[in-house]
Amino acid sequence: MYYPYPNWLVAGDNSWQMTAATFVGLMSLPGIAVLYGGLVKKKWAVNTMLMAFAGFAAVLVVWIFWAYNMGFGTPLHLGGGSGIANILDGFIGHPGSITGPGQELNQANIVNLSAAGPPFHFPYATLEYFQFVFAAITPLLFLGSVLGRMNFKAWLVFVPAWTTCVYAVNAMLIWGGGYWATKGALDFSGGYVIHLAAGVTGFVSAWVIGPRLLRDRQSFPPTNLLLVAVGAGVIWLGWNGFNGGDPYYASADASAALLNTNICTATALLTWVACDSFIGSAKKPTFLGSINGMIVGLVAITPAAGFVNGNAAAAMGVIASLVVFLAWTYLPRVRPFSRVDDALGVVYTHGMAGFLGGIMTGFLADPSMVEYAAGKKNAAALWSSPNGAAGLFYGNSDRVLIQFLTACTIIAWDAVISVLLLLIIKYVLRIPLRYSDHELEEGDVAVHDEEVEPPVLAIRSDITQTLVPEGMR
Amino acid sequence: MYYPYPNWLVAGDNSWQMTAATFVGLMSLPGIAVLYGGLVKKKWAVNTMLMAFAGFAAVLVVWIFWAYNMGFGTPLHLGGGSGIANILDGFIGHPGSITGPGQELNQANIVNLSAAGPPFHFPYATLEYFQFVFAAITPLLFLGSVLGRMNFKAWLVFVPAWTTCVYAVNAMLIWGGGYWATKGALDFSGGYVIHLAAGVTGFVSAWVIGPRLLRDRQSFPPTNLLLVAVGAGVIWLGWNGFNGGDPYYASADASAALLNTNICTATALLTWVACDSFIGSAKKPTFLGSINGMIVGLVAITPAAGFVNGNAAAAMGVIASLVVFLAWTYLPRVRPFSRVDDALGVVYTHGMAGFLGGIMTGFLADPSMVEYAAGKKNAAALWSSPNGAAGLFYGNSDRVLIQFLTACTIIAWDAVISVLLLLIIKYVLRIPLRYSDHELEEGDVAVHDEEVEPPVLAIRSDITQTLVPEGMR
Amino acid sequence: MYYPYPNWLVAGDNSWQMTAATFVGLMSLPGIAVLYGGLVKKKWAVNTMLMAFAGFAAVLVVWIFWAYNMGFGTPLHLGGGSGIANILDGFIGHPGSITGPGQELNQANIVNLSAAGPPFHFPYATLEYFQFVFAAITPLLFLGSVLGRMNFKAWLVFVPAWTTCVYAVNAMLIWGGGYWATKGALDFSGGYVIHLAAGVTGFVSAWVIGPRLLRDRQSFPPTNLLLVAVGAGVIWLGWNGFNGGDPYYASADASAALLNTNICTATALLTWVACDSFIGSAKKPTFLGSINGMIVGLVAITPAAGFVNGNAAAAMGVIASLVVFLAWTYLPRVRPFSRVDDALGVVYTHGMAGFLGGIMTGFLADPSMVEYAAGKKNAAALWSSPNGAAGLFYGNSDRVLIQFLTACTIIAWDAVISVLLLLIIKYVLRIPLRYSDHELEEGDVAVHDEEVEPPVLAIRSDITQTLVPEGMR
Amino acid sequence: MKVVIAVIKPFKLDDVKESLKSLGVQGLTLTEVQGFGRQGGHTETYRGAEYTIDLVPKVRLEIVVDDAMVPDVVDTITTSARTGKIGDGKVWVIPAEEIIRIRTGERGSDAL
Amino acid sequence: MKVVIAVIKPFKLDDVKESLKSLGVQGLTLTEVQGFGRQGGHTETYRGAEYTIDLVPKVRLEIVVDDAMVPDVVDTITTSARTGKIGDGKVWVIPAEEIIRIRTGERGSDAL
Amino acid sequence: MKVVIAVIKPFKLDDVKESLKSLGVQGLTLTEVQGFGRQGGHTETYRGAEYTIDLVPKVRLEIVVDDAMVPDVVDTITTSARTGKIGDGKVWVIPAEEIIRIRTGERGSDAL
Ligand SMILES: Nc1ncnc2c1ncn2[C@@H]1O[C@H](COP(=O)(O)OP(=O)(O)O)[C@@H](O)[C@H]1O
Ligand SMILES: Nc1ncnc2c1ncn2[C@@H]1O[C@H](COP(=O)(O)OP(=O)(O)O)[C@@H](O)[C@H]1O
Ligand SMILES: Nc1ncnc2c1ncn2[C@@H]1O[C@H](COP(=O)(O)OP(=O)(O)O)[C@@H](O)[C@H]1O
């Protein structure tokens, strides 16, 4: 007799987890690549897409050779185990590769969390890849802040360094069983680990790298909104894997997370359209407004998706969309926002929306949205005694504070280390962070010898009549 | 011990159902959004895409607060239970929200059908979301009839109203265990509930709203066929979830439905290409012809996918494609088709194809295409005594009539109520159904202050040298 | 009691297999259609996309009526069972249709392989469709060699003929339990069956059909790189289904194959970007270079994905990308490469990369990458006694030779039969293989009466003020 | 020989083309241009940024004609391109010294 | 009546437009063109093939003005379009015999 | 000073450009235009609707040259753009009164 897999593997859960990971991967490629490629000025479309594709690849390389284990492996105990230094004990994991057969095929496990839930029903390769697609999309998101001037070489160094020193810490602290995880911080799928992190990093990086050319800031109309729609659609539906995959099982909570994700997105989109129509200066609904609202909704529900019920999800969409709309309308006039050229406004749509979502989770987490059930598997009673997380509105009074302090940790660490890494790249490695002004003027043509829609009149002069023969023609 | 999910949940089935729903969601966003966005005249591309994104969101809001239960919940007994009024007993369900924890997490169930098949292996959230993506794509389909003049505000009112008053009725009648369900009407995945409905609604709405500008009817070349290909490809493959998801299990019938869907689509596509090449006026194969054929095939197999065998699927593709090709070639010259400006011809590719598919199902449904098996689960004998549906060719003489009467019910109800709703919007709510002629002349620029490919020379005058500083540069 | 499926069906495995097949389908439509549509000169974009859509459909028709069984059914014993003629015994299967109910619904099985692994957990329809999407993408890949001149009619005859006479043989020999399968040839997901085959066929077909117009070879700038990104992204992530689906179970090996696929792709992409930056003539990283590298990585890992570990996958990406980069830089100057107009270079990115991947698999296959485990299902010991395939580096000395001979068989058969089929189409069926020079000059407009971005000034003269009335307006 | 240049609203192109044909004009060359003038532009908004588009799409016609034809051509264009609303455009006339048909080398009126 | 034609760098358009406005120029017609001249082109590479692009994007302005205005218009353009680097472009002047405003039929200076 | 205007088939551009270079022409301005003339257009079909496209893509060259160069330039274009088939296009010549190089302010022949 042959068996296709060991008995700890549940095909349905592994199937869902691989599928969810693929959906999340699609959010980056082609999702973000063409969303941003369609949103930037035509002369930067190629550069933007190359940054996205190469960034995605670069994360995977560090992920498999050391970074995965820094986020999800055995923690390095740096703190000594008492007082505030405790945080250092759950800060970062032992670096280590995951490329051996056993590291791919054995039953997956997150050391620090294994007591807190049921064993995983899939192998390490699934967990590693699933977590990779999250790690990979994060730099692609903050690319939105720095595009149109950041040097490709600096990007290719910054992304792996950031994944190692920043993302792995975020992940360990909240997801890998690190400090804030033990304190009960709630971040279902990365409102903090990913979106707050992307907003903060993008913003400080845009500040360190400096703004786009004046001419590009004055005139940065999008290349093509049809491509924006392609990216946006893939991102919305791909988010079903983003939030639906995070219970790690094709469970009831996965289904609820998926539904809630769509609910919050729908209300946020409609709220932004309403703001555009009634508050906005032109009083007209806009397509890009609907996309902004959509993204804000997706981001805001991310820390909450499987923790809140559908009513909360609907409310979160309205609130997050309204607040971010107002923030984006009024904050650019005041410091520090007026001083930093965050090209696509990532600090608003990802940073603020992620922060808001995380705080609202602290209020709204509904303990009836069970994640795992303890007890006898077949007991009918089981699902009436859920062990889900409770927010302030459900009697858990310090949840909001924990959410807030977790956010502060992420903001502080990510901002400081991102700046540091960029300065090291600039002054120690001596790689320029930005293109020269001449290159910035020409864009894609200067830096890649490519254009997104090359002139039809282009001539390839090395082909002559005689070079290629007529075949058997 | 912890358990990730209750024992009625089968991870494999929940995985497939969530995946299938995501594929169907992708058919709308970005699928329909860019298929239609690429097919319309350039000046309407943004409006078309915004209509699609906002319509999708609007359906979800009514779906979760009341409409899901009107289609799939407990029926309101309006009829009194005898004679023809019977139809009113299985016409519409009690409205009610589905946003509470239990309404998301408990085992899914369709009250009226629970005796007719095995229990569902997934929670309500899965069923609600799966059914949502079907409800959401329907208005996006009939958008194809009314685009290029329908007012966005009227659209945002019409879509939720239509979902409530029309779609929920279609669903209850055929899928929710309502009147025609009890009579044995066959509609595997929405040949009637969705496509016939979209064709009829689009057609009457185009009539009520009035035609596009003469100038737009005279000149409506597509914006970009590459985007049409993106949309079309996502729609074809997304249909694997559309028809493959409707058995509600990752069952053998799901697999067969999926294969049959592709078979019918392939023959329909090739038939249309042949018609273009040999019957069409230019005698040339065309890309848009192949896409029309593809859509006709996908639609025609929808009511039949898991009920017919592969031979029938192949035949259905040829027949539907040929008939719709001829209809679209000759009917536009006669009334009422000559009098209504159905911009993208939804009445042909969805309305007629759905109708044809439903009727052909009445002939071709093969009882060996078992849907659920009754009996002892492990008995080898089980699968030799299938309980599938039989069509006229398999001895079930009144099946065709039932299919026909079901179609008539849908056509009549949807046409009448759609017209009524539009008149209420116009005369009671006083929201104009169409843009003013001036807005129609300018299109996107006038109504959304956006263009699909904005001029590179656009100047943003509020940015000056001093506004954004140089960062740490 | 009702049951949704028989007890041999495992929902999780069927779910994954249907999902994986859908991802692979998406690689063709819209994947290849818009990757190639975006890469060709604007005047050929429509033709390219129509070729892709119609080719996909055409393969399915022959697949269901006869070709599936020629690749995966009962072998025709043509050889007599001894000596070299042995190869004829495992060369091709009995043609036969798969469209009946039982042929869709019964438990899937590959006759020749059933003793070598566990029984399949899904019905025939799943296997047939899964194998179809592989059969369908192959001609779409070699379309890249012949586009810009091949006659659409000849294409529509060549594709089904090739699927029948070439693809089915490739599949039987290696996957269907044919000759090379029995010798232990390793081709996880089609490095040979698909990519080497596409490279060889594309190359010889380009030679037989003759080159594009001189003017098109001199000037063939891509239409739109944003669409290239859409296609490329869908292809990368779709490959998760391509390689992740080939274990036929949602197994640990599926997960490892999926992870390895991404690893090899990432290193290959970065290697090509490095080559462009440091070796290339312009010393600049390019977007299309990154896409070339990506494809080379995806192709190279295809024969190896579930057989090698992560380290090997990373190495394969570097090696394949470097070799193909050098080949593509230098070989076009020497014969036969200088004499054949392989428009998109399929012989390099698919042919060579597939060949290299297959040979490297012979060296690197790691026996610890278990595919199926023999023994008692629940025994913990099970997974410590894997039965995976071993390459030369793991002591299996003749593996490389077998891989090499298998490649030779594919190259020889595919080249000879492809040429033969084209000559038959030309001289026997008298269908011209290429368009006339006049048609080649005009491209899409001449052969399909369509343009990818039609002029906005186009006028439809048959619509007059009175034709369409004003509705209820 | 003169060149008549006309800048008109794009949707009037068909009318103008038809009436020129009736007049016997056998050829013209057309360019998609952008006009700046009394007809105001508009504003577009992308991700919160407002763009002023003060250029309006127009079509520019260039027609080489015999001197004798100039008044008729100018009149025809003026009439058929007129909507009476701001932005209808301009017509102006430039002297041409020579005209050659590339295909045949014919010159002057024969080349038209 | 004259027509001033100017071929300039695209990013200078706004400056030129503004200074012409200050001068009282009420309208102009603009075309996106490609220039060939001393300013070199560049190379692009697609799938291994090198393309020479020796054409540089430029903007072409066409302004009908009264004879008296010509020197000012030419000077203004020359000044505001200048960067001092190769490729700044040219201005030239052509005689126009007549100009008509389509909307009103006005001719000559009134039509501007 | 004259302006030579040529409307040619797009694929002939390279030949024309090369032969003008050989002649010593140092610059020109090129516009993608659409021509209407004896060369027929074609029909396109989209979703069942037939569109008549009677405009053919052409390239328009605009070359300011010294009076003395005009005959050579015209001849060179005529020769190198000719295919002998309908639609080869036209060349015409217009007087220019002044030409200025923006970068330097040079005028006349020096500005070319
Ligand atoms: N002085 C000018 N030189 C060249 N083109 C002009 C001039 N004035 C206007 N135009 C062109 O004519 C178009 C219409 O002019 P505008 O002032 O808007 O309206 P009207 O012609 O009705 O007075 C402009 O968009 C521009 O293309
Ligand atoms: N003889 C000419 N006729 C028409 N346009 C010209 C001519 N010479 C140059 N141009 C235009 O002027 C632009 C700038 O010319 P170039 O020689 O590159 O720089 P510069 O004007 O600084 O000497 C060219 O791109 C072209 O559009
Ligand atoms: N009177 C004209 N004024 C301006 N352009 C013209 C004129 N006649 C023809 N053309 C241009 O010349 C092109 C070729 O003219 P056509 O009549 O098709 O062929 P041919 O020049 O060979 O006689 C046209 O497409 C158009 O762009």
Image (cartoon, coloured by chain):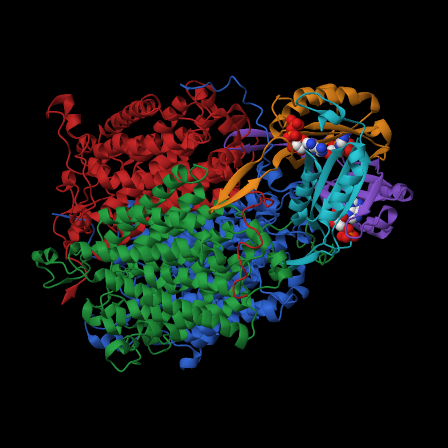
Chain colours: A green, B red, C blue, D orange, E cyan, F purple
Residue D60 at least partly seen: no
Q: What residue is at 84 percent from the left and 28 percent from the top? A: D1
Q: What residue is at 20 percent from the left and 41 percent from the top? A: B97
Give the x, y percent position of residue C412. 54, 63
Q: Answer with left or right where residue B69 lies relative to residue C184.
A: left
Residue E53 at least partly seen: yes
Q: What residue is at 33 percent from the left and 32 percent from the top? A: B157
In front of the other: C60 or E105: E105
In front of the other: A131 or C362: A131
From the viewer's perspective, is residue B45 above or below residue C41?
above
Pick the quarter of the image with the N terminus of chain F.
Answer: top right
**Looking at the rendering, which quadrant does residue A376 occupy?**
bottom left
From the viewer's perspective, is residue D87 above or below residue E50?
above
Give the x, y percent position of residue A317. 31, 47
In front of the other: C110 or B160: B160
In front of the other: C206 or C294: C294
Q: Farthest residue to the right: give it.
A: F68
Give the x, y percent position of residue C438. 68, 40
From the viewer's perspective, is residue B341 above or below residue A380?
above
